[in-house]
């Protein structure tokens, strides 16, 4: 049973912006790192961004660095992904994940143990 719920997906035009949110009310939120992953049809799930539980350390894939921003609000138990200058290749199902990955697994889905059900992002003009 997913303990996270994503929202905010939908249709966005190329060059536009979209904000995804993930709530995790059932988790001891501040004890977890959070990541965003995505999976396009016919492709493997890939890392997008991560936010460490300690401090403000953030990580991004090369493909989204400079365009996407991950933030977290421990008080509200939410983590968000602000997507700017969206491209066609950003279309995918986006998943929020929680875990305590070591650095070598931070960008791997095996580093996370709690997943949401995903939210669809469609890019079209």
Image: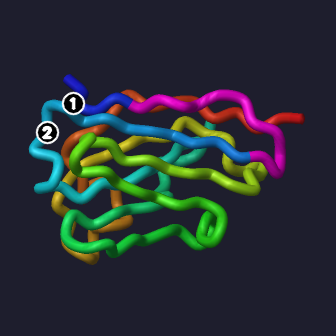
Q: In the image, is residue 9 part of the stretch drawn in magenta?
A: yes
Q: Secondary structure at mark 1?
A: loop
* Residue 90 image position (x, y, % from top left): 67, 49
Residue at far front of view: 75
The answer to whether marks 2 and 1 mark residues whose Cβ atoms lie closer than 8 Å is yes
What whole-number distance in Å separates the C-alpha atoms at marks 2 and 1? 7 Å
Q: Is residue 62 left or right of residue 104?
A: right
**Residue in the image at 42% along x and 51% along y:** 36
| Mark in front: 2 vs 1 | 2
**Residue that carries the numbered disc 1 in the rendered image:** 3
Range shown magenta: 6-16
Q: Secondary structure at mark 2?
A: loop
- Quarter of the figure with residue 41: top right
- Quarter of the figure with residue 1: top left
**Residue in the image at 41% along x and 57% along y:** 71
**Residue in the image at 24% along x and 49% along y:** 98
* Residue 18 image position (x, y, % from top left): 64, 42
Q: Is residue 117 left or right of residue 27?
A: right
Q: In the image, is residue 94 part of the stretch drawn in magenta?
A: no
Q: Count neighbours of disc 2 (C-alpha within 10 A) and say few if under 14, some if 14 to 19, many if 20 or more.
A: some
Q: Is residue 42 visible?
A: no
Q: Is residue 2 left or right of residue 108?
A: left
């Amino acid at each position: 049973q997913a303990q996270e719920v994503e929202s905010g997906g939908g249709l966005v035009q190329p060059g536009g912006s979209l904000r995804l949110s993930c709530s995790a009310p059932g988790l001891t939120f501040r004890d977890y790192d959070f990541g965003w992953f995505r999976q396009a049809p016919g492709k493997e799930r890939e890392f997008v961004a991560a936010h460490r539980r300690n401090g403000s350390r953030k990580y991004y894939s090369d493909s989204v660095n400079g365009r996407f921003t991950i933030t977290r609000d421990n008080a509200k138990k939410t983590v968000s992904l602000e997507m700017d200058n969206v491209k066609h290749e950003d279309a995918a199902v986006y998943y929020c994940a929680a875990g305590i990955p070591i650095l070598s697994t931070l960008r791997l889905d095996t580093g996370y143990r709690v997943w949401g059900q995903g939210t669809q992002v469609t890019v079209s003009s």
